[in-house]
Each structure stands twice: as C-alpha cells, then as structure tokens.
Amino acid sequence: MTSSDIVVVGGGVIGCAVTWSLAREGLSVTLLERDDLATHASGAMAGMLLGIGEGERGDFFRAWAQRSLALFPELCAELRECSGIDPEFEACGALYVAESANAEAVLRDKAQHFTGQGAEWLDAQALRCAEPQAAPGLRGALWGPQDAHVRSPLLARAYAAAAAALGARITCGVAVTGIRRDGSRVHGVDTDRGPHDAGGVVLCAGAWTPAILGAPLPIEPVRGQIVSVDNARPPLRAIVFGGDLYLVPKRDASVVVGATIERVGFDCRVTVGGVASLLDGAARLAPALAGSRFRTAWAGLRPATPDDLPTVGRVPGCEGLWLAAGHTRNGVLLAPVTGELVTDLILGKSPALDVGPVSPGRWLLA
C-alpha cells in the first residue's frame, strides 16, 4: 500500500474527526477502517452534546466538553458545505429531570454551579410547562439551554467526506493487524492487505485499540443498547435525561432512547432484557411514549477506561505513535476537540487545553 504522512486507524467519529483535522492542515492522511464508517460505537450513539455533562468528572472534563460543544455550530455548517452531508445539529437544550429528593438536591446544586452557561432549576410546574410530556411525578429539572445533539453516524461520514475533499484517502474493508516499528520509531501499520508505510500512526480503534497496540492498555468494551420509537404527540422538544436514561428527539419524528451500560466483553447482541429496560424507562420519563410505535434497536461497544476519561496523546517510548481512544459515551461530544488537540500534538504546537490527565503515559510506561 502507498505511504502517507499519517495513518489513522479506525473509522468511528474520533478517527474521522482526526483525519479531517489533519487533512485541513495539509498533511497526507489515510484512514483505514476494518468494516464501514461509524459501524461500531459511533453507530450506536444518540449524538448528545452535553456541555454540563453526564456524571461528575470535574473541571478538566468540563473544559474539554464545553470547548468541544462550542465548536459544533460552525463545524457542522462547514462539514455540510464541504461534504454535502448534514450532521443534523439541533440546539434544543436538555432537561436533567429529578425523580427523587436526592436527585433534586444534586441538580439544584449543579444549576447554581452552571449559571454562567444559562443553567437554571425548574420546579415541577415549570418543568411541565417546558415539556408537557414529562412524567407528572417528576420533582423538577435542571435546564441546560446550550446542550444539543447530532446524528452521530452522519457526523462521522460528514467528517470523512470533507477530509476526502481535502485529499485524504478513506479506505474501508482493511483490517489493521499491528504497528510497524524500527526500534522505538513507528513507520506504519501492517494490514490484512499488506504493509502501509507512514510517518506516523494515530490509533482511534475504540475498544479494539489495545489489541492493535499490542500493549496492556486498560480500554475495555462496554455494550450500549439503544432503541428508537416514534415521538409522542405533541412531540418531545428537548433532550430529557434521567439518571443513565435519555430521550433524544430527532428530525425524523423519532425519539432515540438509551442506553444500557453492560460489561459483557465483545458481545454486541441486542437483548430482550436490554430493550425492555429502555422501553420501560422511556415510559417512566415520558408516559405518552408507551403508546408509540417501536422502530428499531441496536447496540455498540463503547471504549471505556478506569477513570472514565479518554486516552489522547503520544505513546511513551514510541516516536510517531499517538492514541485517541477510550471516550466511552462521549466520543461524539469530544470529537472536535480531540481532532484539534491530536493535530496540535502531531504538528508540535502547544495544545489549547491541558492534555496531561488524558495522556497515554498514565497507563503505559516508556
């Protein structure tokens, strides 16, 4: 196979974002994907862009999330113009609902913390006015007006098509089997179609990254099942987020309901129990959805790390090898900032954000 400045391994949203960002800087880039673009984790995401965020991961994660979220409006417009593919960016806001007194206390505190981003606490009456389909027993909600969503497979494909328009080579159906090294210097990858020479390699292969790297990197697959149903009437307008369950209204009059969190290895089956739990949860948060038509269900393997942060940066002791993997449920949200930061690191620029806490060096010793 021909040589490139950089080979990107993995055609999910992270790999496609990195490819586009590098191609935009004039590098010769080849993306290699074993299957098809957005086939795995990126194809089983609801595409939520939550600047306030899921869970409690501190100011470092929030800085990444909020910077990345701020990039989306202009990014999606540029990708749509360059690729002809609309990622379906929707700045609809999100309601983080409280089903218990403890949840209410946490969300009220978070509302005060994020007032600078326009967040506010809505009591039960205000919640019903904002979202008439919300369950009557909910105690209220944190309103995040900056939160949004996209169609994650469309975002990945738009990135790839825009990168191709800049000269990047997007090659699917090629499995990368290992990294080619000369001492500590990386000079390409081995594939099931032969070697591919490159000046550098970026591994963005999600849960399969450790196997390709050939090192004990603690990124494990977490199955996320997800379903799609018809929207209610009148339709849900905003994202509704209750605990680990979310409802995301899409342009095609559907609601995406997700997602399970299951540590079952590389088992990517859709199960009766998983689908039932999601449908029960959807009806609990928005009872009108109980009467909606079921559309489909699917699953993906999200790449998770022990500290719930991605792994981004140069591999210690390997000149010319970078990682961008382990984003768990936040690959779509963090794709723009990941592409930006990986490109800065490869070009030797000072990154706009601190990358120390996500460095591969926290797992791998030189």
Image (cartoon, helix red, strand yellow):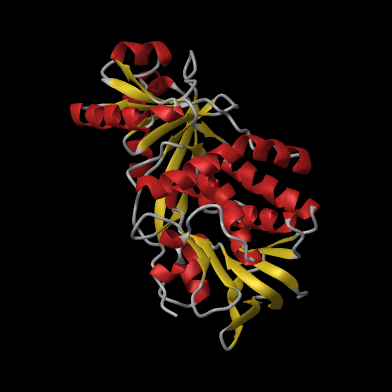
Examine the rendering and report whether any part of residue 10 can be seen: no
Which quadrant of the rendered structure holds the C terminus? Answer: bottom left
Q: Quadrant of the N terminus?
A: bottom right
In this picture, is 138 found above or below 347?
above
| Relative vertical location of residue 153 with respect to residue 33 in this rendering, above or below | above
Left/right of residue 78 with respect to residue 266 in the rendered view: right
Residue 126: give x, y in percent of width and height: 35, 12
Residue furthest bottom as drawn: 183
| Location of residue 180 with respect to 37 vertically, above or below | below
Residue pictured at 36% horizontal, 43% vertical = 274
Q: Is residue 244 visible?
A: yes
Quarter of the image where one finds residue 217: bottom left
- Front-most of 362 and 350? 350
Residue drawn at x 63%, y 52% as measured from the top left: 17
Nearer-the-camera pick, 120 or 300: 120
Image quadrant where residue 140 sits? top left
What is the quadrant of residue 339 in the picture?
Answer: bottom right
Compared across the picture, whether 261 is left or right of 20 comes to: left
Q: Can you give x and y, in whole percent of width and height, for residue 348 in the image?
A: 63, 66
Q: Position of residue 28 (x, y in %)?
A: 76, 65
| Left or right of residue 347, residue 146 in this image | left
Check the image and name the residue furthest to the front: 350
The residue located at (33%, 23%) in the rendering is: 141
Q: Position of residue 286 (x, y in %)?
A: 37, 22
